[in-house]
Image (cartoon, rainbow, N blue to C red):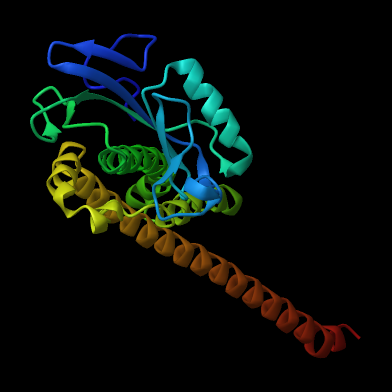
Protein backbone atom coordinates (compact mmCIF):
# COMPACT_ATOMS: atom_id res chain seq x y z
CA UNK A 1 0.00 0.00 0.00
CA UNK A 2 1.31 3.42 -0.90
CA UNK A 3 0.45 6.21 1.47
CA UNK A 4 2.21 9.02 -0.38
CA UNK A 5 2.29 9.89 -4.06
CA UNK A 6 5.29 9.03 -6.17
CA UNK A 7 6.36 12.67 -6.39
CA UNK A 8 6.40 15.57 -3.96
CA UNK A 9 3.15 17.41 -3.36
CA UNK A 10 1.88 20.38 -1.42
CA UNK A 11 0.88 18.84 1.95
CA UNK A 12 -2.54 20.41 2.32
CA UNK A 13 -3.78 21.04 -1.18
CA UNK A 14 -5.48 18.91 -3.78
CA UNK A 15 -4.23 21.00 -6.68
CA UNK A 16 -0.94 22.89 -7.08
CA UNK A 17 1.03 24.33 -9.94
CA UNK A 18 4.29 23.32 -11.56
CA UNK A 19 6.50 24.69 -14.31
CA UNK A 20 4.85 22.36 -16.82
CA UNK A 21 1.29 23.20 -15.75
CA UNK A 22 -1.24 22.28 -13.10
CA UNK A 23 -0.63 19.37 -10.71
CA UNK A 24 -3.65 17.42 -9.52
CA UNK A 25 -3.56 15.12 -6.52
CA UNK A 26 -5.48 11.83 -6.83
CA UNK A 27 -6.26 9.38 -4.06
CA UNK A 28 -7.88 5.94 -4.36
CA UNK A 29 -9.34 4.35 -1.23
CA UNK A 30 -10.85 0.89 -0.65
CA UNK A 31 -13.70 1.51 1.78
CA UNK A 32 -15.21 -1.97 2.10
CA UNK A 33 -16.41 -5.09 0.32
CA UNK A 34 -19.03 -3.33 -1.82
CA UNK A 35 -20.30 0.18 -2.53
CA UNK A 36 -23.89 0.82 -3.54
CA UNK A 37 -23.43 3.42 -6.28
CA UNK A 38 -27.05 3.49 -7.39
CA UNK A 39 -28.13 7.09 -7.78
CA UNK A 40 -24.60 8.48 -7.77
CA UNK A 41 -24.30 8.81 -11.52
CA UNK A 42 -25.66 11.62 -13.69
CA UNK A 43 -29.45 11.71 -13.54
CA UNK A 44 -29.42 9.46 -10.47
CA UNK A 45 -28.96 6.29 -12.51
CA UNK A 46 -26.61 3.39 -11.86
CA UNK A 47 -23.84 3.16 -14.44
CA UNK A 48 -20.97 0.82 -15.28
CA UNK A 49 -17.79 1.20 -13.23
CA UNK A 50 -16.52 3.73 -12.53
CA UNK A 51 -19.48 5.96 -11.72
CA UNK A 52 -18.77 9.72 -11.49
CA UNK A 53 -19.82 11.22 -8.16
CA UNK A 54 -21.28 14.70 -7.88
CA UNK A 55 -18.72 16.90 -6.10
CA UNK A 56 -18.10 20.65 -5.85
CA UNK A 57 -15.70 22.08 -8.46
CA UNK A 58 -12.82 21.60 -9.01
CA UNK A 59 -13.10 18.18 -7.30
CA UNK A 60 -13.78 15.07 -9.38
CA UNK A 61 -14.58 11.65 -7.90
CA UNK A 62 -15.45 8.16 -9.10
CA UNK A 63 -17.02 5.18 -7.30
CA UNK A 64 -16.61 1.46 -7.98
CA UNK A 65 -19.20 -1.10 -6.93
CA UNK A 66 -16.48 -3.32 -5.44
CA UNK A 67 -15.82 -0.76 -2.70
CA UNK A 68 -13.34 1.73 -4.14
CA UNK A 69 -13.52 5.52 -4.42
CA UNK A 70 -11.06 7.73 -6.30
CA UNK A 71 -10.96 11.47 -5.59
CA UNK A 72 -9.16 14.10 -7.69
CA UNK A 73 -8.22 17.62 -6.61
CA UNK A 74 -9.48 17.55 -3.01
CA UNK A 75 -7.67 18.48 0.18
CA UNK A 76 -7.80 16.08 3.19
CA UNK A 77 -10.82 17.84 4.71
CA UNK A 78 -12.80 17.64 1.48
CA UNK A 79 -11.80 14.00 1.02
CA UNK A 80 -12.93 13.13 4.55
CA UNK A 81 -16.31 14.80 3.99
CA UNK A 82 -16.89 12.95 0.73
CA UNK A 83 -15.90 9.58 2.19
CA UNK A 84 -18.13 10.14 5.21
CA UNK A 85 -21.08 10.85 2.91
CA UNK A 86 -20.50 7.50 1.20
CA UNK A 87 -20.28 5.62 4.50
CA UNK A 88 -23.94 4.41 4.58
CA UNK A 89 -23.48 2.90 1.12
CA UNK A 90 -20.57 0.64 2.16
CA UNK A 91 -21.03 -3.08 2.85
CA UNK A 92 -18.59 -4.59 5.37
CA UNK A 93 -16.34 -1.54 5.87
CA UNK A 94 -12.67 -2.38 6.21
CA UNK A 95 -10.79 -2.00 9.49
CA UNK A 96 -8.04 -0.16 7.62
CA UNK A 97 -8.37 1.62 4.30
CA UNK A 98 -5.97 0.48 1.57
CA UNK A 99 -5.08 3.37 -0.70
CA UNK A 100 -3.04 4.56 -3.67
CA UNK A 101 -2.00 8.20 -4.11
CA UNK A 102 -0.62 9.82 -7.26
CA UNK A 103 0.11 13.19 -8.83
CA UNK A 104 -1.29 14.18 -12.22
CA UNK A 105 0.26 16.84 -14.44
CA UNK A 106 -2.37 18.51 -16.62
CA UNK A 107 -1.66 20.18 -19.94
CA UNK A 108 0.84 17.58 -21.19
CA UNK A 109 1.42 17.13 -24.92
CA UNK A 110 0.30 13.51 -24.68
CA UNK A 111 -1.03 11.15 -22.05
CA UNK A 112 1.38 8.91 -20.18
CA UNK A 113 3.57 8.59 -17.09
CA UNK A 114 6.94 10.30 -16.67
CA UNK A 115 10.11 8.85 -15.14
CA UNK A 116 9.16 10.09 -11.66
CA UNK A 117 5.79 8.38 -11.74
CA UNK A 118 3.77 11.56 -12.33
CA UNK A 119 0.77 10.83 -14.55
CA UNK A 120 0.68 13.11 -17.61
CA UNK A 121 -2.73 14.08 -19.04
CA UNK A 122 -3.60 16.36 -21.92
CA UNK A 123 -6.64 17.66 -20.07
CA UNK A 124 -9.03 16.93 -17.22
CA UNK A 125 -11.71 15.30 -19.36
CA UNK A 126 -13.92 12.88 -17.37
CA UNK A 127 -13.02 9.94 -19.58
CA UNK A 128 -9.30 10.48 -18.95
CA UNK A 129 -9.82 10.75 -15.22
CA UNK A 130 -11.96 7.59 -15.33
CA UNK A 131 -9.08 5.63 -16.89
CA UNK A 132 -6.70 6.94 -14.22
CA UNK A 133 -9.25 6.16 -11.50
CA UNK A 134 -9.50 2.56 -12.74
CA UNK A 135 -5.73 2.04 -12.49
CA UNK A 136 -5.40 3.67 -9.05
CA UNK A 137 -8.40 1.80 -7.63
CA UNK A 138 -7.11 -1.55 -8.86
CA UNK A 139 -3.65 -0.82 -7.46
CA UNK A 140 -5.19 -0.04 -4.07
CA UNK A 141 -7.30 -3.22 -4.25
CA UNK A 142 -4.21 -5.27 -5.07
CA UNK A 143 -2.41 -3.72 -2.10
CA UNK A 144 -5.27 -4.81 0.15
CA UNK A 145 -5.25 -8.31 -1.31
CA UNK A 146 -1.48 -8.56 -0.93
CA UNK A 147 -1.77 -7.69 2.77
CA UNK A 148 -4.53 -10.26 3.32
CA UNK A 149 -2.65 -12.99 1.49
CA UNK A 150 0.55 -12.21 3.45
CA UNK A 151 -1.42 -12.57 6.68
CA UNK A 152 -2.92 -15.87 5.52
CA UNK A 153 0.53 -17.20 4.60
CA UNK A 154 1.90 -16.15 7.99
CA UNK A 155 -0.90 -18.04 9.73
CA UNK A 156 -0.37 -21.19 7.67
CA UNK A 157 3.43 -21.19 7.93
CA UNK A 158 3.67 -22.67 11.49
CA UNK A 159 1.51 -25.65 10.50
CA UNK A 160 3.49 -26.20 7.29
CA UNK A 161 6.83 -25.86 9.11
CA UNK A 162 5.69 -28.30 11.79
CA UNK A 163 4.60 -30.78 9.15
CA UNK A 164 7.94 -30.43 7.38
CA UNK A 165 9.99 -30.84 10.57
CA UNK A 166 7.99 -33.50 12.42
CA UNK A 167 6.18 -35.20 9.56
CA UNK A 168 2.86 -34.78 11.35
CA UNK A 169 0.53 -32.15 12.72
CA UNK A 170 1.20 -31.38 16.37
CA UNK A 171 -1.31 -28.52 16.56
CA UNK A 172 -4.55 -28.96 18.43
CA UNK A 173 -7.59 -29.35 16.21
CA UNK A 174 -9.03 -26.05 17.44
CA UNK A 175 -5.81 -24.10 16.76
CA UNK A 176 -5.49 -25.64 13.31
CA UNK A 177 -9.13 -24.89 12.56
CA UNK A 178 -8.56 -21.23 13.45
CA UNK A 179 -5.57 -21.01 11.12
CA UNK A 180 -7.47 -22.71 8.30
CA UNK A 181 -10.46 -20.43 8.95
CA UNK A 182 -8.35 -17.28 8.62
CA UNK A 183 -6.76 -18.60 5.42
CA UNK A 184 -10.15 -19.57 3.95
CA UNK A 185 -11.50 -16.10 4.73
CA UNK A 186 -8.59 -14.41 2.95
CA UNK A 187 -8.89 -16.86 0.04
CA UNK A 188 -12.62 -16.33 -0.52
CA UNK A 189 -12.54 -12.54 -0.03
CA UNK A 190 -9.75 -12.14 -2.55
CA UNK A 191 -11.38 -14.37 -5.16
CA UNK A 192 -14.41 -12.05 -5.05
CA UNK A 193 -12.40 -8.91 -5.70
CA UNK A 194 -11.79 -6.96 -8.89
CA UNK A 195 -9.93 -8.55 -11.78
CA UNK A 196 -6.79 -6.50 -12.36
CA UNK A 197 -6.56 -7.60 -16.00
CA UNK A 198 -10.01 -6.24 -16.91
CA UNK A 199 -10.03 -3.07 -18.99
CA UNK A 200 -12.20 -0.15 -17.87
CA UNK A 201 -15.51 0.01 -19.70
CA UNK A 202 -14.90 3.64 -20.63
CA UNK A 203 -12.48 2.36 -23.30
CA UNK A 204 -15.43 1.00 -25.28
CA UNK A 205 -16.45 4.55 -26.10
CA UNK A 206 -12.94 6.03 -26.04
CA UNK A 207 -10.53 3.57 -27.68
CA UNK A 208 -8.04 6.41 -28.13
CA UNK A 209 -7.28 6.07 -24.40
CA UNK A 210 -6.06 2.48 -24.77
CA UNK A 211 -2.43 3.65 -24.72
CA UNK A 212 -2.95 5.58 -21.49
CA UNK A 213 -4.56 2.54 -19.87
CA UNK A 214 -1.70 0.29 -20.99
CA UNK A 215 0.91 2.74 -19.65
CA UNK A 216 -0.84 2.98 -16.28
CA UNK A 217 -1.25 -0.80 -16.04
CA UNK A 218 2.48 -1.12 -16.66
CA UNK A 219 3.38 1.63 -14.17
CA UNK A 220 1.39 0.02 -11.35
CA UNK A 221 2.27 -3.55 -12.46
CA UNK A 222 -1.38 -4.56 -12.39
CA UNK A 223 -1.04 -7.72 -14.48
CA UNK A 224 2.11 -8.92 -12.73
CA UNK A 225 0.74 -8.34 -9.24
CA UNK A 226 -2.55 -9.99 -10.16
CA UNK A 227 -0.73 -13.06 -11.50
CA UNK A 228 1.40 -13.36 -8.35
CA UNK A 229 -1.69 -13.12 -6.16
CA UNK A 230 -3.42 -15.79 -8.23
CA UNK A 231 -0.48 -18.17 -7.73
CA UNK A 232 -0.49 -17.51 -4.00
CA UNK A 233 -4.24 -18.11 -3.84
CA UNK A 234 -3.80 -21.45 -5.58
CA UNK A 235 -1.02 -22.39 -3.13
CA UNK A 236 -3.16 -21.41 -0.15
CA UNK A 237 -6.11 -23.39 -1.53
CA UNK A 238 -3.94 -26.50 -2.04
CA UNK A 239 -2.37 -26.13 1.41
CA UNK A 240 -5.77 -25.82 3.07
CA UNK A 241 -6.98 -28.97 1.29
CA UNK A 242 -3.87 -30.85 2.41
CA UNK A 243 -4.20 -29.75 6.03
CA UNK A 244 -7.89 -30.62 6.09
CA UNK A 245 -7.13 -34.07 4.64
CA UNK A 246 -4.46 -34.67 7.28
CA UNK A 247 -6.80 -33.47 10.00
CA UNK A 248 -9.53 -35.83 8.79
CA UNK A 249 -7.04 -38.69 8.61
CA UNK A 250 -5.92 -37.91 12.16
CA UNK A 251 -9.52 -38.00 13.35
CA UNK A 252 -10.17 -41.23 11.46
CA UNK A 253 -7.12 -42.80 13.08
CA UNK A 254 -8.38 -41.71 16.48
CA UNK A 255 -11.78 -43.24 15.77
CA UNK A 256 -10.16 -46.48 14.63
CA UNK A 257 -8.12 -46.61 17.83
CA UNK A 258 -11.27 -46.03 19.88
CA UNK A 259 -13.09 -48.83 18.01
CA UNK A 260 -10.15 -51.21 18.58
CA UNK A 261 -10.13 -50.32 22.27
CA UNK A 262 -13.87 -50.94 22.56
CA UNK A 263 -13.56 -54.27 20.75
CA UNK A 264 -10.72 -55.23 23.10
CA UNK A 265 -12.82 -54.34 26.13
CA UNK A 266 -15.74 -56.36 24.73
CA UNK A 267 -13.48 -59.39 24.09
CA UNK A 268 -12.02 -59.15 27.59
CA UNK A 269 -15.49 -58.93 29.12
CA UNK A 270 -16.68 -61.93 27.08
CA UNK A 271 -13.67 -64.00 28.16
CA UNK A 272 -14.30 -63.08 31.76
CA UNK A 273 -17.99 -63.96 31.60
CA UNK A 274 -17.63 -67.26 29.74
CA UNK A 275 -14.17 -68.55 30.63
CA UNK A 276 -12.57 -67.00 33.69
CA UNK A 277 -15.66 -66.51 35.87
CA UNK A 278 -16.93 -70.14 35.44
CA UNK A 279 -13.48 -71.41 36.47
CA UNK A 280 -13.71 -69.43 39.70
CA UNK A 281 -17.01 -71.04 40.53
Q: Eyeballing the image, is 250 above or below 51?
A: below
In the image: residue 12, left or right of residue 42: left
Q: Eyeballing the image, is 182 above or below 241?
A: above
Q: Eyeballing the image, is 209 above or below 11?
A: below
Residue 90 shows in this picture: yes
Q: How many marks?
A: 0
Residue 70 shows in this picture: no
Q: Residue 75: x percent and y percent?
A: 42, 16
Q: Residue 69: x percent and y percent?
A: 44, 37
In the image: residue 134, left or right of residue 260: left
Seen from the viewer's position, the closer of residues 3 and 256 is 3
Q: Residue 51: x percent and y percent?
A: 43, 46
Residue furthest toward the right?
281
Q: Residue at x 52, y 22 (%)?
A: 80
Seen from the viewer's position, the closer of residues 20 and 151 is 20
Residue furthest toward the front?
43
Q: Residue at x 43, y 59 (%)?
A: 240
Seen from the viewer's position, the closer of residues 217 and 144 is 217
Q: Residue at x 19, y 44 (%)?
A: 217
Q: Residue 250: x percent and y percent?
A: 52, 65
- The quarter in which the N terminus is drawn is top left
In the image: residue 253, left or right of residue 269: left
Q: Residue at x 60, y 35 (%)?
A: 87
In the image: residue 267, left or right of residue 1: right
- The quarter in which the C terminus is drawn is bottom right
Question: Within the image, what quadrant is residue 275 found in?
Answer: bottom right
Amino acid sequence: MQETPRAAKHPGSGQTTAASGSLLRARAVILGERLDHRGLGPGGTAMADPVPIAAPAPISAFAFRWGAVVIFGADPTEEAALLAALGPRITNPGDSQAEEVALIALGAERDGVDAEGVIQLCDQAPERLAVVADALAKSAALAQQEARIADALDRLEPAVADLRAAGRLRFSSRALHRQIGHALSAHSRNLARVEAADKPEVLWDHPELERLHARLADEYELLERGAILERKLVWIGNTIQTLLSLLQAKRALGLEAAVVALVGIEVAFTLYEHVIRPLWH
